[in-house]
Image (cartoon, helix red, strand yellow):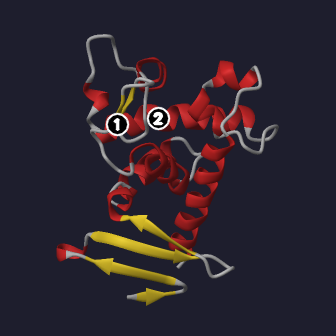
Amino acid sequence: MTRGGLVALLGLGGAAVLLVATNAEGASTVIPGSVLNWQAVAEKYAAIYSILNPEEILSIIWTESTGNAKGENPGDPSWGLMGVTTLIARSYGGFTSGDDSWKTDGDKNVRAGAGFLAYLKDRYSAKYPNWVEIYNVGETKFLRGIGNPDYSRRFFSQLNALTTQQAG
């Protein structure tokens, strides 16, 4: 199927397997179906955290786990769709020390990750164009001048692809 610069390949039952978004320069980006599968959850939490749009949440999911709800980064350590740490799960998801369900439950993981992302966007986006780096390096490190420009470039590139896909 082709629509407004988009090519989508659909699998059985209409589940998105692959979507290709083309930007104004003609460059295309393949959006994994494993990311698009979380669209409804992203919409749910964008409605709760109104400063966010679903594409921003999906871009973090794409960047952190490529849509793998059981993703894990032992180096952080962080888990799940949005690469949530224990501190973020407790602070922004309301999970207690005995509840680790947010590590593999996609909805719960996005609740915590989107809460943190909304806080960061509200607090820093007006002052720092690459505010999303804070999601990756942490607030304390970012305020000490430590960033990750590759993370924000990837996030904004993927956000552009997702936004283009939604506009089509």
| Residue at 64% from the left image edge and 46% from the top image edge | 150
Q: Which mark is residue 121?
A: none
| Residue at 58% from the left image edge and 34% from the top image edge | 135
Q: Position of residue 166 (x, y in %)?
A: 51, 70
Q: Position of residue 123 (x, y in %)?
A: 71, 31
| Residue at 49% from the left image edge and 38% from the top image edge | 114
Query: Disc 2 residue type?
Result: Gly
Q: Is residue 140 left or right of residue 37?
A: right
Q: Position of residue 110 (x, y in %)?
A: 40, 39
Looking at the image, the residue that sits furthest to the bottom is 2
Query: Disc 1 residue type?
Result: Gly
Q: Are marks 2 and 1 in contact (CB under 8 Å)?
A: yes
Give above or below for 79 relative to 10.
above
| Residue at 48% from the left image edge and 87% from the top image edge | 3
Give above or below for 153 relative to 11.
above
Which circle's residue, 2 or 1, is located before the other in the chain? 1
Residue 9 in sight: yes
Number of marks drawn: 2
Q: Name the residue carrying label 1.
A: 80
Q: Which mark is residue 113?
A: 2
Give above or below for 4 relative to 74.
below
Q: Give the camera-side residue of 85 and 47.
A: 85
Label 2: how many Cα within 10 Å (few below 14, some 14–19, many 20+): many
Q: Quadrant of residue 89?
A: top left
Q: Is residue 110 left or right of residue 162?
A: left
2 vs 1, front mark: 1
Q: Give the camera-side residue of 98 and 72.
A: 72
Using the numbered discs, state the Cα–Cα distance from disc 2 to disc 1 in whole angstroms. 9 Å
Q: Quadrant of residue 119?
A: top right
Q: Position of residue 57 (x, y in %)?
A: 50, 48
Q: Is residue 31 left or right of residue 145?
A: left
Give above or below for 88 relative to 10.
above
